[in-house]
Image (cartoon, grey):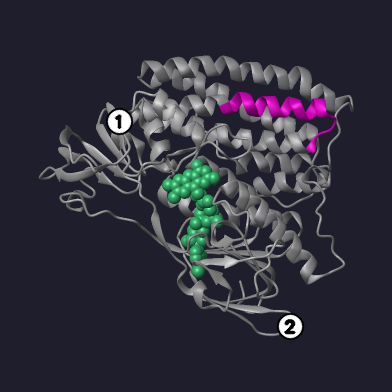
Amino acid sequence: MAANEVYDITIIGGGPVGLYGLYYAGLRKMKAKIIEALPEFGGQVTALYPEKFIYDVAGFPAILGRDLVKEQVEQGLQYDPTVCLGEKVLELKRVDDDHFQLIGENGKHLSKTVVIAGGVGAFTLRHISTPGLNELEGKGVYYVVKRVEEFRDKRVLIVGGGDTALDWAIGLEHLAKKITLSHRLDEWQGHEDTIDKVYRSSVNVLFPHYEMKQVHGKDRVEGVTMVQIKTKETFDLEMDAIIVNVGFIANLGPIAEWGLELEKRHIVVNFKMETNLKGVYGAGDIITHPSKLNLIAQGYGEIAAAVNLSKNYIDPKQRVQPQHSTHMKKEELGEAIQKKLGEEKTSLTGGDVAQFVLGMEREKAKFYQQAAPKVGRKEVEEAFKKIFQEEEEHCRTLESEILPKFQSGDYTWNNEMGEKLRIRLERSVTLPAPEKDGALSPEEALKMGLQAEEEVIGLCRKAASAVQPTEGSLAFRRLAEADAVHLQIFKGLMQKDSI
Ligand SMILES: Cc1cc2nc3c(=O)[nH]c(=O)nc-3n(C[C@H](O)[C@H](O)[C@H](O)COP(=O)(O)OP(=O)(O)OC[C@H]3O[C@@H](n4cnc5c(N)ncnc54)[C@H](O)[C@@H]3O)c2cc1C
């Protein structure tokens, strides 16, 4: 990446909102770059709640933070943008009518437009100063939950009254031995339905006006004295862990010095997501406007608008309104498949891809069949045996329904790809090693299965987008869905594994 290379759009911040913007920039064929201060994508989701379920992102009744980020990274990177991770942007200035210069920790970046999706900037978690609490941070006191397994069979006190505290109370209810939720105010700050769920659960709710008075424990949390603030009544609870969710303090960092109009540490944007600097847009938690909600869902809409408007800003002849993604040319989807498989585009037929998927399903079936007796854990063995049968069924569907449809011309494909490429594709995908000799550890076997399933699911989903008519598309999608169930089974078994 040359320092003087000019990008159409540079997105500052690789949280959920920035990642969605990156996808949209690719869809609009913009030369895009993303710069993220942290070493990995995902913003607050990765840093603060990778193992919490998110219930309010469209299309997912419940999705783990970590899984949402994973899907978004796949979506966001599919058009090969330039990615700069672990680099904070320190300065932003206009160098001439057409360009901005950004100075990052690792060098200079030139861009025609900029979208700031910096979230809450550099954030620090708000701490509380109950006697005995902060001395035990890392020894039973948590301000961030990164691994839910740490709470298995523990007595856990959750402090806070917002959605995060409420979500954790529900999320950990069945894993922990006992959950107590305490809130010091006389009103909850979370969603109404989440509050109802907490009251319907087995969570012991201390509300209103309860707070910790003293945390006990020498090397680890052992208990806590609680106080009812109004009545001054105190009582002791035995406790193994305390999770404090009382928000965080946002700090815009260098962004505050870029000449942007700010209001209470947020960037002011108009209804077009424009900041006061022409060509610089904002989206996500970092912005403010009259209908602002700090929700991932709203950030997606904001950045879609920002990216489409920046396209029109660079060249006013370009439409603001994008084509619907489902109208994308079939050739592009074919290219996407080939890109995933790490190949130069020559030609691609649907039959080739179906044949390739069939090869993968056969490999998987063989692996599950051979690995089952070697894993030495009953549940994994049984799951593998069952999944082996299902993979065989998938092979039959591919052989008897999907491939003949391609041969008879009932299914059409976007472009063509030769035999040579197909063989090379097979080599580019990581498959488990079914012939592996000797015993397999259940963890190793599950990891292999997981990896192979993920490969095939990704391939089937892309194939579903490239095949016509709908019936053909559905056939691939059903395969992807059936294999996605295997993923869930493996994940469940892996979680049990780490007990
Ligand atoms: C505990 C918790 C639970 C939540 N639960 C939900 C939920 O269930 N549903 C929901 O919709 N929302 C939830 N939220 C809110 C949600 O996480 C945010 O709305 C969302 O993360 C905002 O995304 P973003 O991309 O705008 O910002 P962020 O996720 O904050 O990402 C911004 C990124 O920008 C980077 N950055 C900042 N400054 C710079 C710079 N100068 N240079 C380079 N990079 C920079 C940061 O490092 C960060 O990675 C929750 C938040 C918390 C804290």
Above or below: residue 434 compared with residue 13: above
Left or right of 220 in this view: 321: right
Specify the label residue 97 is tagged with. Answer: 2
The disc, 2 or 1, on the residue closer to the chain's N-terminal end is 2
Above or below: residue 463 compared with residue 30: above
Q: Secondary structure at mark 1?
A: strand
Displayed quadrant of residue 228? top left
Q: Residues within 10 Å of mark 2 (few under 14, many from 20)?
A: few
Q: Is residue 30 visible?
A: yes
**Spot occupied by residue 137 in the image (x, y as percentages of width and height):** 23, 50
Q: Residue at x 61, y 52 (%)?
A: 299
Kindly give the residue lying farthest to the bottom in the view shown. Answer: 96
Above or below: residue 391 compared with residue 112: above
Q: Does the beta carbon at disc 2 come under 8 Å from ligand 1?
A: no
**Spot occupied by residue 106 in the image (x, y as percentages of width and height):** 49, 74
**Residue 473 shown in magenta:** yes
**Residue 128 shown in magenta:** no
The residue nearer to you, when weighing 25 against 298, is 298
Image quadrant for the N terminus?
bottom right
Kindly give the residue lying farthest to the right in the view shown. Answer: 409
The residue nearer to you, when weighing 411 against 227, is 227
Identify residue for label 1. Answer: 179
Kindly give the residue lying farthest to the front in the view shown. Answer: 231
Q: Residue at x 57, y 67 (%)?
A: 267
Q: Secondary structure at mark 2?
A: loop
Question: Which segment did they paint magenta?
Answer: 466-484
User: Looking at numbered disc 2 in the image, what kind of residue is underneath it?
Assistant: Asp
User: Looking at numbered disc 1 in the image, what kind of residue is underneath it?
Assistant: Ile
Q: Residue at x 68, y 64 (%)?
A: 270
Left or right of 169 in this view: 256: right
Q: CA distance from mark 2 to mark 1?
A: 58 Å
